[in-house]
Amino acid sequence: MKKKFRVAKAGQTTDGRAIPVEHINQMAANYNPATYNARVNLEHFKSMLPNSDFRCYGDVTALETEVENGETYLVAEIDPTDDLIALAQSRQKVHFSIEYDPNFAEKGFAYLVGLACTDSPASLGTSYMQFCQQHPSENPLSARKSKTTNVVSTAEFTGDFDKPRQSVFSTITGLFSDKKTPEEQEAESVAQLLSHLPTTLSNIEAGLKALAQSHDALHANFGEVTKKIDAVETHQNEQQQALAQVQGTLDTTVDLNYNQRPPATGASTDYQKTDC
């Protein structure tokens, strides 16, 4: 959710210097994120840690100028992170202060190098401003500058991201919350359903193809299992037949060590005794 804010005007800075109108115009004319991207920070602190409270909170995507009642303003288009939006909605860090290099890369023009969100109001406190103007080298903000020669503006303008990003649910709900006739709402609903119909049919077709492939694979696997069962049954029958053949052979084979007893003659006086 990009939004434009007035972030500075020609005039007072935190160390007693003034921002010339030419610098405002040069910053607007020369700003290009591809050359140097000015990021939004917290109170001009720039942490190297992405999970720090002093991480970056967005980017300046464009600059322009506005003139009103003889005052020249620098207007920044800001692409905020969700954290910056949350800060603004909780009414924290709602003022902006710029940091710019009066002679950027020794090219002879002013360039915006950073934008801070802060809770410090317009004058940053009368005693604080008097101290900074009388002792610029001891300005507490000096240590936070990218270069000691850079200029930090006073925080004069309020930032308010009053339109939070809509979730998908909010977007869908909005379709039905507009003041439209029931017929219009019904027509839009039908149109939306019809717009999704090709995708739905395509998904159904893909599902049916996948189901058919699964059925074919299952049928093929079942055929293989049936063949294996038939092979096992055939092998078992062959084993049973072989076993029966062996059994029959054993039953009809004579013992080689067998001697038959001599037959009895049947005489009444002489008889054969059994040799037991």
Image: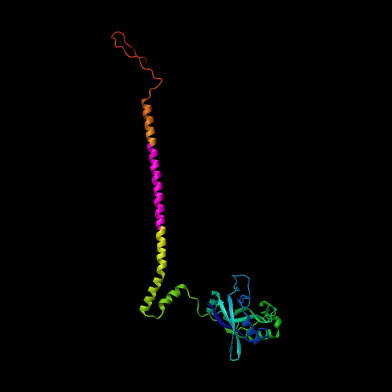
The answer to which image quadrant residue 172 occupies is bottom left
- State left or right for residue 172 relative to residue 20: left
Q: Is residue 231 visible?
A: yes
Q: Which residue is found at the position 45% from the left and 75% from the top?
A: 171
Which residue lies most toward the left here? 268
State the image coordinates of residue 152 (x, y, percent, origin top left).
65, 81
Picture layout, residue 199 above or below residue 7: above
The quarter of the displayed image where residue 58 is located: bottom right
Q: How many marks?
A: 0
User: Residue 38's spot in the image, x, y percent?
Assistant: 62, 77
Look at the image and give the residue range highlighted in magenta: 211-237
Residue 222 coordinates in the image, percent (x, y): 39, 49
The answer to which of 84 and 126 lies nearer the viewer is 84
Instruction: Give the dominant element type of the magenta stretch: helix, strand or loop.
Output: helix
Corner quadrant of residue 245: top left
Residue 119 seen: no
The residue most toward the bottom is 69
Residue 234 sits inside the magenta stretch: yes
Q: Nearer the viewer, residue 150 or 214?
A: 214
Which residue does the image show at 41% across and 78% down from the upper left? 177
Question: In the image, residue 184 lies at what x, y percent?
Answer: 37, 78
Asked whether residue 197 is drawn in magenta, I would say no
Q: Nearer the viewer, residue 227 or 104?
A: 227
Extreme top residue here? 269
Is 16 located above or below residue 86 in the figure? Answer: below
